[in-house]
Image (tube, coloured by chain):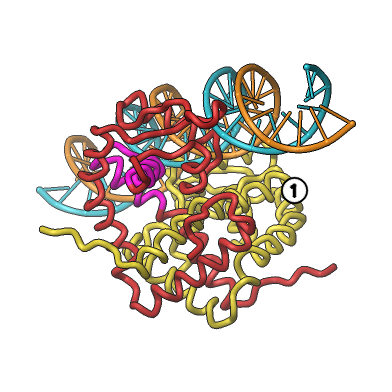
Chain colours: A red, B yellow, C orange, D cyan
Amino acid sequence: MSTRWLDDTEMTAWVRLAAVLELLPGVLDSQLRRDAELTHYEYYVLAMLSEAPKRTLRMTALAQRTNATLPRLSHVVKRLEDRGLVERFPCPEDARATNARLTAPGWKKIKATAPGHVETVRQHVIDVLTPEQISQLAAITGAILESVDPDGNLSAVYRR
Amino acid sequence: MSTRWLDDTEMTAWVRLAAVLELLPGVLDSQLRRDAELTHYEYYVLAMLSEAPKRTLRMTALAQRTNATLPRLSHVVKRLEDRGLVERFPCPEDARATNARLTAPGWKKIKATAPGHVETVRQHVIDVLTPEQISQLAAITGAILESVDPDGNLSAVYRR
DNA sequence: GCATGATGGTTGTAGCTACAACCATTAGGA
DNA sequence: TCCTAATGGTTGTAGCTACAACCATCATGC
């Protein structure tokens, strides 16, 4: 079976997407590390908790919302717990499960950090695109996510 | 100064892009690790060398083409050298510089690996998009790269 | 010539992630 | 009532990346 290579247009799109994949996370990480001593992933964990009812989520649900595996989340939450930004406690309804809850310092942290982070996202993504392009980007990334994660095991959030 | 928060459309686009940033690299990495014992970044290094004249590039040029910092590249090339896929030698014109060259086994490796990798890229990105969306993606990622890397210090490749 | 700064690259190390192994609890049958 | 499989989560460890420190060479001005 012969390979279907990429044509020029496809190659341009892919090479640029690959570059974004490589560079953008670093930009987000370094702003957050500099201003808040958080990685982008840690920020996302705090942000998802801050929007949840009672600022509490089960580990599995939190992993799904943050597009991560459970082992990764477990390590990250432990570190956040050591820093006093999050606390864990056993789930009353299911003894297997663990709940993660944002603490008061965690809430203050995310409140203080959000504006700078949103500004960074605007600067490098949103504000460099036209409104049409923003809609296009949502459709394109939606299609990619469908194929990367067809069952929505991770990232339930991106579905409308 | 008050924060300009994201509206619904902007938020959808950003959340999905963030999910792609988190999930797609893992998909690419695991295919390559499974089929060729290479990370996506290592693959890219070999691929850029394979397209260069004499399959040779200076470390700085290679770092630029692969969107990486020099320290990162240096570590990766050392590992590839240990595996016999790449070799390094001092640059004749500038004694400060180092050239990296693809070896014969490295050439065979990239030749054998490329079809499977292209297939993965097609499956998860190219083939899930319409031709219009592929053009849109190139424009969108181009704009993002302009802001992330305005001087083209990294990633000179994405420029037309 | 020879300082001084810029350029090109390597190395050491701390910290995060992936993967696999593992344990506890729950659910579903027979 | 067990037995088994599935679910929910944690832990250990190897391996990669980021950051800073470092060294050598080149270029410039005087």
Q: Amino acid at mark 1?
A: Asp
Q: Was residue A30 drawn as part of the magenta stretch in this picture?
A: yes
- Looking at the image, residue A120 sits to the left or right of residue A160; the answer is left
The numbered mark 1 sits on a residue in which chain? Answer: B
Q: In the image, what residue occupies the spot 81% across and 69% down?
A: A2
**Where A135 falls versus A39 (above or below)?**
below
Front-most of residues A66 and A38: A66
Q: Position of residue B114 (x, y in %)?
A: 71, 59
Q: In the image, what residue occupies the spot 45% across and 32% down?
A: A99
Q: Quadrant of the N terminus of chain B?
A: bottom left
Say if residue B61 shows up in the picture.
Answer: no
Front-most of residues A7 and A127: A127
- Looking at the image, residue A1 sits to the left or right of residue A112; the answer is right
Say if residue B14 shows up in the picture.
Answer: yes
Q: Secondary structure at mark 1?
A: helix
Q: Position of residue A114 (x, y in %)?
A: 25, 49
Q: In the image, what residue occupies the spot 52% across and 53% down?
A: A155
**Where B43 falls versus B122 (above or below)?**
above
Q: Position of residue A12 (x, y in %)?
A: 53, 72
Q: Main secondary structure of the magenta part?
A: helix
Farthest-out residue, bottom: B132
Name the residue carrying label 1. B35
Q: Quadrant of residue A50?
A: top left
Q: Start and end of the magenta stretch?
A: A25-50
Front-most of residues B153 and B19: B19
Q: In the image, what residue occupies the spot 70% across and 71% down?
A: A5
